Image: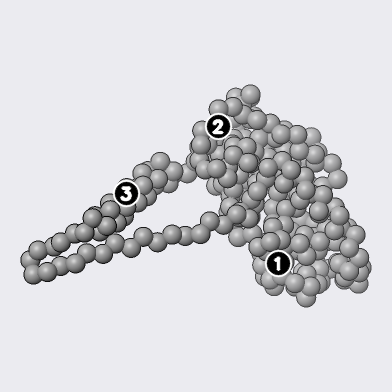
Amino acid sequence: MENMDVAPEKTVIASEKETDDTVVFKRSHFYAIMVVFSFAIGILVGYVAWGRTPTAQQAIVPPAQAAAGPEANPAYTRYDIPTEGFPSLGPADAEIVVVEFSDYQCPFCKRWFDQVYQPLLAAYPGQIRLVFRNLPLTSIHPDAMSAAVASMCADEQGSFWQFHDKLFSDEYGFGRNAYTRYATDLELDTVAFEACLDSGKFDQFIQEDMDFSLNMGVRSTPTFFVNGLAVVGAQPLDVFKQIIDKELAGEIP
């Protein structure tokens, strides 16, 4: 998942000096080797503990807690996420409402689009309503905001989801020329579309989306809410199916 906080990498270097057939270790050398050994053990333990695909219970975590690492969540929390007035796909009375906070320039959002988006909808025909909300991480993705604006301008002409798919296809990349080419491919009114891009009419709408999500503790994209249950990251299809199946069966309080 794409996060705005990036931790620096650290490198530990160990050395040893060999004379004839005798290896002499200084105390500092011994400590350095132990650090490397401990680090390797930590990597192995981490792989065994967290290298597998997460279960549904591991995937459902409060957004703010997700940044702290893979911890057990003692209770399920349902969030009240407004959906009225936002682009949506699927029946208005669907049993499952999935709200996605996303960034068109986020590689993890694209991975979810490529691998999970259509298969998930196909697995539950008529049962899922997908709602899209914008969270462009402008500090690390310079074109994310303009892409969000372009998608809303396409929505103005009734082609949000078609334009959404074009952006994630990355066929022409990002930027004004790319957006106009996508609009042309979709046979939109390009004059009206470009006027919309210049108008700034959706800037406040998108900013309010960003403020809402950040105030809730969402710090990375993609972040999903499945009937209000937070699912953080580009989780695989099986994880979403586990959660949805449990939700349909009434097994999640």
Residue 33 falls left or right of residue 170: left
Mark 3 = which residue?
38
Mark with earlier residue (3, 1)? 3
Q: Nearer the viewer, mark 3 or mark 2?
A: 3
Can the viewer see residue 10 in this picture? yes
x and y percentages locating residue 181 in the rendered image: 78, 73
- The residue under label 1 is 142
* Residue 103 sits in quarter: bottom right
Q: Position of residue 12 (x, y in %)?
A: 36, 60
Residue at image x 15%, y 67%? 18
Determine the secondary structure under disc 1.
loop
| Left or right of 52 in this view: 233 | right
Q: CA gap, disc 3 to disc 2?
A: 28 Å
Q: Is residue 35 left or right of residue 1?
A: left
For marks 1 and 2, the one nearer the N-term is: 2
Residue 60 image point, x, y percent: 59, 36
Disc 3 residue type? Ser
Residue at image position (36%, 44%) is 45
In 3D space, how far apart are the residues under numbered discs 3 and 1 (Cα atoms)? Answer: 39 Å
The label shown at residue 73 is: 2
Mark-to-mark CA distance, 1 and 2: 34 Å
Residue furthest front in the image: 27
Q: Give yes or no for contact between labels 1 and 2 (Cβ–Cβ under 8 Å).
A: no
Residue type marked 2: Asn
- Residue ID at (52%, 43%): 69
Q: Quadrant of the C terminus?
A: top right
Q: Earlier in the sequence, mark 3 or mark 2?
A: 3
